[in-house]
Image (tube, rainbow, N blue to C red):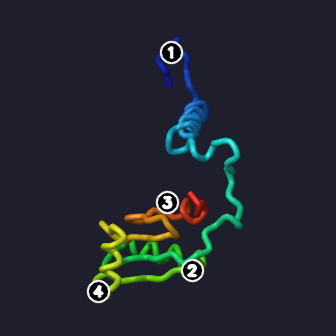
Amino acid sequence: MKNGINGETMTLKTVLAVTALLLMFSSAGAEMFQPGSKMVTSQNDRFTGRVELYVTSWCGYCKKALEYVKSNNINYVVYDIEKDSVAHKRYRELGGHGIPLIVIGTHRMSGYSQEGLEYYLNNPGK
């Protein structure tokens, strides 16, 4: 593919390498490369508390989140916010807007993504 600079051709490998570097130094990736930080988290740094899932029975992403914590032997508790008024109140107090609401220690996730959940599980202090 032509990159427009001196008419040179860039290979897919080059494009991927440049993309990786950009991600590495973007605001999202910069935290991972600060002096003294670790790129790979050891199992000892993994979140060991109980993950809270605020769900509804009809939510597909809630089911995916629940499936993930079950299959990865993660300590969790599930609250159905439509069937449990106390859970619904807590959901609102936590700033819930969307489901599932997943609480990992001091972190909250609205919605579910495996990558997001894994990030918080592997970086409990951040």
Q: Nearer the viewer, residue 118 or 49?
A: 49
Q: Amino acid at mark 2?
A: Asn
Earlier-in-chain disc, 4 versus 3: 4
Q: Which residue is mark 2?
A: 75
Q: Which residue is mark 4?
A: 85
Judge from the rendering whether residue 124 lies leftward or rightward of residue 1; answer left or right: right
Q: Which residue is mark 1?
A: 5
Tag 4 secondary structure: helix
Tag 3 secondary structure: helix
Marks 4 and 1 close (CB-CB < 8 Å) = no
Identified at 30% across, 88% down, the residue is 83
Identified at 57% across, 66% down, the residue is 121
Earlier-in-chain disc, 3 versus 1: 1
Spatial separation of the CA atoms under disc 2 and disc 4? 23 Å
Q: Nearer the viewer, residue 57 or 124?
A: 124
Earlier-in-chain disc, 1 versus 2: 1
Earlier-in-chain disc, 2 versus 3: 2
Judge from the rendering whether residue 42 lies leftward or rightward of residue 120; answer left or right: right
Spatial separation of the CA atoms under disc 2 and disc 3? 17 Å
Q: Which residue is mark 3?
A: 116
- Indicate which disc residue 40 carries: none
Q: Amino acid at mark 1?
A: Ile
Spatial separation of the CA atoms under disc 1 and disc 2? 53 Å
Tag 2 secondary structure: loop
Marks 3 and 1 close (CB-CB < 8 Å) = no
Spatial separation of the CA atoms under disc 4 and disc 3? 28 Å
Total labels: the figure holds 4
Q: Amino acid at mark 3?
A: Gly
Identified at 51% across, 75% down, the residue is 51
Earlier-in-chain disc, 2 versus 4: 2
